[in-house]
Image: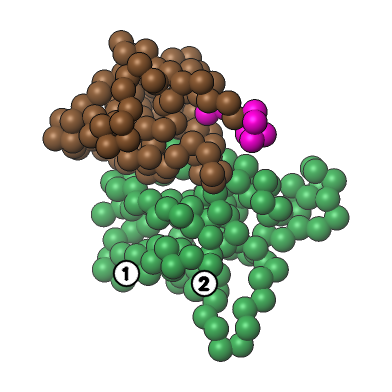
Chain colours: A brown, B green
Amino acid sequence: MSQNINSTIEQSDVLGKSEQKKIAIIVRCAPYGQSLAQEAMDAILAISLYCEHISVVFIGDGVFQLLANQKSQLIDNKSIEKQLQAFSLYDIEQVLICQQSLNQRNLTMEQLSVNENDVKVLDKTALNATIRAHDSLLTF
Amino acid sequence: MNLSVAIYAAPSSQTAYTAYQFVRSALQQGHSIYRVFFYADGAYQGTDLSCIPQGEWSLQDAWKNLSDEYQIDLVLCIAASLKRGMLNSEEAQRYDKKNHNVADHFDLSGLGQLADAAIMSDRMITFGE
């Protein structure tokens, strides 16, 4: 079985980044409180190395990850906010945010660390349609 | 259909069991499983040191049997595993640890395997915490 894995890795190396598939990574978890948010960041950055077309979608409590002025050092955690800023370096094609999730949490764009021009805030219907245009979904 | 499954749930969680049932049902219905990727707390499913009391059902044994029967690829994320004290002999040597505890049938590999699964499969199904 380990042989299978090695051959897949080699194959990925030969093929380089996949250009055909569109992957959406849906982030639903809050930034701190469990390690999943950090592990989601690690996965997003890793997957961006293998796939050309990546969208990251923040819905539900996932929108809390976008808050500005996170002081994660006070709880001895790595800052999710800083890692989000690296998205532009990693070729993340689009960042989508659920409007209803922001509304439900009484959040406005001004409170977020992301630049309004770099993200799309969509209502549920538009978001569903956009997500449906992807080949594969990964949820955190 | 060619499916892959990502599991973040610890073996103590019902979600981990549901993931197993999903994979078993999919295989029984003739679908193929490209990869099962254990991430975050899901990595604990690969420990060789859990001792399940008699009369209780072992999720790990169930995965092993499924892997024997259908030759499915059971991959533990190496970063998630190392963080949680899940090492194979190679990693134990690399990090100068006396012991290693990854069970047979489970391989340690990188997040690239998750990306590869998302790219190569028709559907990716996530079983969260």
Q: Is residue A14 left or right of residue A60?
A: right
Rendered-image quadrant of the N terminus of chain B: bottom left
Q: Could you give the CA–CA distance between mark 1 and mark 2, rounded to whole angstroms?
A: 15 Å
Q: Specify the segment rendered in magenta.
A: A73-80
**Is A117 placed left or right of B87 in the picture?**
left
Name the amino acid, label 2.
Leu
x and y percent of residue A10 in the render? 53, 35
The residue under the point 26% across, 32% down is A103
- Label 1 neighbour load within 10 Å: few <14, some 14-19, many 20+: few
Sequence-earlier tag: 1 or 2: 1
Residue at 81% x, 58% y: name it: B99
In the rendered structure, the residue with mark 2 lies on which chain?
B
Closer-to-camera residue (A44/B68):
A44
The reply to whether residue B110 is in sight is yes
Any mark on residue A25, and which? none
Residue A119 rendering spot, x and y as whole percentages: 31, 18
Q: Are marks 1 and 2 in contact (CB under 8 Å)?
A: no
Q: Secondary structure at mark 1?
A: helix
State the SS at label 2: helix
Circle 2 is placed at which residue position? B59
From the viewer's perspective, is the residue at label 1 or at label 2 nearer?
Answer: 2
Quickly name the residue at label 1.
B25
Residue A59 x %, y %: 32, 37
Q: Residue furthest top?
A: A117
Residue B81, image x, y percentages: 63, 50
Q: Is residue B52 above or below residue A32?
A: below
Is B124 rendered above or below residue A126?
below
Residue furthest out toward the bottom:
B55
**Does residue A109 sit above or below B9 in this rendering?**
above
Which image quadrant is residue B49 in?
bottom right
**In which chain is the residue bearing label 1?**
B
